[in-house]
Image: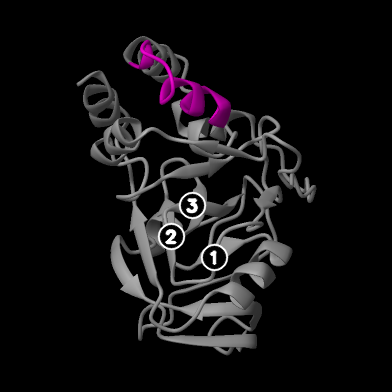
């Protein structure tokens, strides 16, 4: 679970906790409180973080460990606290107290998680859907090329609200129906309300990094 990673990054027993999470196949959920094996479709509940523990601050060394593990972008300073597991349709968004500035958008296909950072602080996270095996989502770093609030795909005759295009071949982050059994044609599908919030916060040129983290590499990096 996401709570497990926050704890693991905050205490000396990080390696043991990470190993336990890997063995139970729960490590993917560590970043956003969700486990692919327990995701439930059509749960459109917004798990907004609030209260005095709305944010968990990471010591620099722990953030560097998570970066080496391929779990967080470089320079991560804090994560949104999670109330527990998140399912398809769930999201958290809280930018209270975080100064305006460029966004870094981190997408991990293995964990099915998107995290939005501003100045090293996570301000949003959600469960995603992504490309099917026949039309995989691309990996790499991409600037946001254009924004379209009410885009409709002519190729697939499908609405793509709050689209942030990152390639000239039509790959975008956009609002999408959410289900554990859904896949896209290569885009990153987001809960529609989360997509609206991201659309409002993001600007052309903000960077999107799409990765597929490796659980074994993550365990080795967190043990260092």
Identify the residue at image location x=38%, y=18%: 18
Query: Callout 1: few (<14), some (14-19), or many (20+) C-alpha neighbours within 10 Å?
Result: few
Query: Callout 3: few (<14), some (14-19), or many (20+) C-alpha neighbours within 10 Å?
Result: many
SS at mark 2 in the image: loop
Number of marks in picture? 3
| Residue 152 horizontal/vertical position (percent) | 63, 87
Position of 34 compared to 178: left or right?
left
Look at mark 2 in the image and give the residue it sits on. 119
Badge 3 vs badge 1, beta-carbon distance below 8 Å: no
Badge 1 vs badge 2, beta-carbon distance below 8 Å: yes
SS at mark 1 in the image: loop
Mark 3 or mark 1, earlier in chain: 1
3D distance between C-alphas at marks 3 and 1: 10 Å
Identify the residue at image location x=50%, y=28%: 6
Look at mark 3 in the image and give the residue it sits on. 121
> Up-down: is 204 above or below 210?
below
Position of 180 compared to 103: left or right?
right
Residue 40 sits in quarter: top right
Badge 2 vs badge 3, beta-carbon distance below 8 Å: yes
3D distance between C-alphas at marks 1 and 2: 8 Å
Mark 1 or mark 2, earlier in chain: 1
Looking at the image, can residue 10 be seen?
yes
Position of 71 compared to 118: left or right?
left
Identify the residue at image location x=30%, y=50%: 74
Q: Quadrant of the N terminus?
A: top right
| Residue 83 horizontal/vertical position (percent) | 70, 32
Look at mark 1 in the image and give the residue it sits on. 99
Identify the residue at image location x=57%, y=80%: 156
Q: Which mark is residue 185?
A: none
Looking at the image, can residue 128 be seen?
no
Highlighted range, magenta: 1-14
């Amino acid at each position: 679970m996401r709570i497990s990673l926050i704890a693991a990054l905050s205490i000396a027993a990080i390696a043991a906790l990470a190993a336990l999470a890997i063995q139970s196949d729960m490590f993917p959920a560590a970043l956003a409180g969700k486990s692919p094996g327990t995701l439930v479709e059509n749960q459109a509940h917004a798990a907004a973080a609030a209260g005095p523990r709305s944010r968990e601050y990471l010591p620099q060394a722990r953030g560097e460990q998570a970066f080496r593990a391929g779990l967080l972008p470089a320079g991560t300073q804090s994560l949104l606290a999670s109330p527990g597991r998140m399912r398809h349709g769930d999201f958290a968004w809280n930018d209270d107290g975080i100064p305006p500035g460029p966004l870094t958008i981190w997408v991990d296909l293995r964990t099915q998680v998107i995290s939005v950072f501003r100045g090293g602080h996570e301000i949003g996270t959600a469960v995603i859907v992504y490309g099917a095996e026949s039309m995989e989502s691309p990996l790499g770093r991409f600037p946001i090329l254009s924004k379209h609030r009410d885009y409709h795909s002519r190729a697939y005759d499908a609405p793509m609200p709050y689209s942030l295009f990152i390639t000239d071949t039509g790959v975008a982050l956009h609002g999408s129906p959410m289900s554990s059994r859904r896949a896209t044609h290569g885009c990153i599908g987001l809960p529609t309300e989360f997509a609206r919030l991201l659309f409002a916060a993001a600007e052309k040129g903000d960077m999107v990094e799409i990765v597929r983290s490796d659980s074994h590499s993550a365990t080795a990096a967190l043990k260092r």
